Image (tube, rainbow, N blue to C red):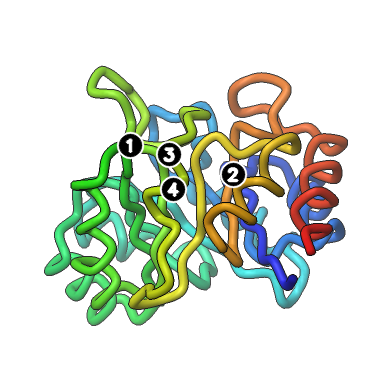
Amino acid sequence: MDIRVKICGLKEPEHVVAAAEAGAAYIGLNFFAKSPRYVDFERARELCLATPVGVGKVGLVVNVDDAFLEELVDKVPLDFLQLHGKETPERVVEVKARFGLPVIKAIGIAEAADVAQIDAFGSVADQLLVDAKAPKDAVLPGGNGLAFDWRLVNRKYWPCPWLLAGGLTVDNVAEAIRMTGARQVDLSSGVESAPGVKDIGMIRAFMGAALGVV
């Protein structure tokens, strides 16, 4: 099975290179200031320039305005924008039209009612990132290391390509792929030794588990 992996929240060039060498299809850079994975524009540019050719560079933003996005795309050579906040379908359309980059829209799933977002956003986004819904008191919109009931997204039809996220680790990624039929997965905290601190050994182990699913 051809599985594509996105390692998000990278902050060090050596971790970017390790993820790419292990087979990651995307690297994610976090521009949410409250996150332990946050990078500024200057650092993000360095990381993008360190990324091997062929690996998609994704910028994660949360409820930002056009001025922020204009500066971001001007200073950082990204391939995708990931909207990880409370953006509406209309906002997704606006961002795609104005900034000319493919948009990945993150949606949070906790119960069956949340699945309706798949159709609402899947008709306007280029890809969906299906994550565990953050707890009401959470500081972070994602990257909380929480899983959800994967049976909720085990469906045959999706309006666009999608990535499964939320609590994935080396120990459960194979089961998650088999249960959901996901062809793409995303994680951040699952390859960290501490919040915001990536571990090259954990990255390699996770990639081996994910890419080895048959």
Callout 3: SS? loop
Of the residues tagged 2 and 3, which is closer to the observer? 3
In primary-sequence order, the first of circles 2 and 3 is 3
Q: CA distance from mark 2 to mark 4?
A: 19 Å
Q: At label 2, which amino acid type do we have?
A: Leu
Q: Could you tell me which residue is drawn at 33 percent across and 56 percent down? A: 83
* Image location of residue 55, percent across then percent down: 69, 70
In primary-sequence order, the first of circles 1 and 2 is 1
Q: Could you tell me which residue is drawn at 74 percent across and 71 percent down? A: 1
In primary-sequence order, the first of circles 1 and 3 is 1
* Image location of residue 149, percent across then percent down: 43, 39
121 to the left or right of 109:
left
**Residue behind mark 2:** 187
Callout 1: SS? loop
Q: CA distance from mark 2 to mark 3?
A: 16 Å
Q: Could you tell me which residue is drawn at 19 percent across and 67 percent down? A: 120
Q: At label 1, which amino acid type do we have?
A: Lys
Q: CA distance from mark 1 to mark 2?
A: 14 Å
Q: At label 3, which amino acid type do we have?
A: Asp
Does the rendering let one see residue 151? yes
Of the residues tagged 4 and 1, which is closer to the observer? 4
The disc label shown at residue 133, or none: 1
Q: Is residue 147 above or below residue 27?
A: above
In primary-sequence order, the first of circles 2 and 4 is 4
Q: Is residue 170 above or below residue 75?
A: above
**Residue behind mark 3:** 149
Is there CB contact under 8 Å for labels 2 and 4?
A: no
Q: CA distance from mark 1 to mark 3?
A: 11 Å
**Residue behind mark 4:** 151
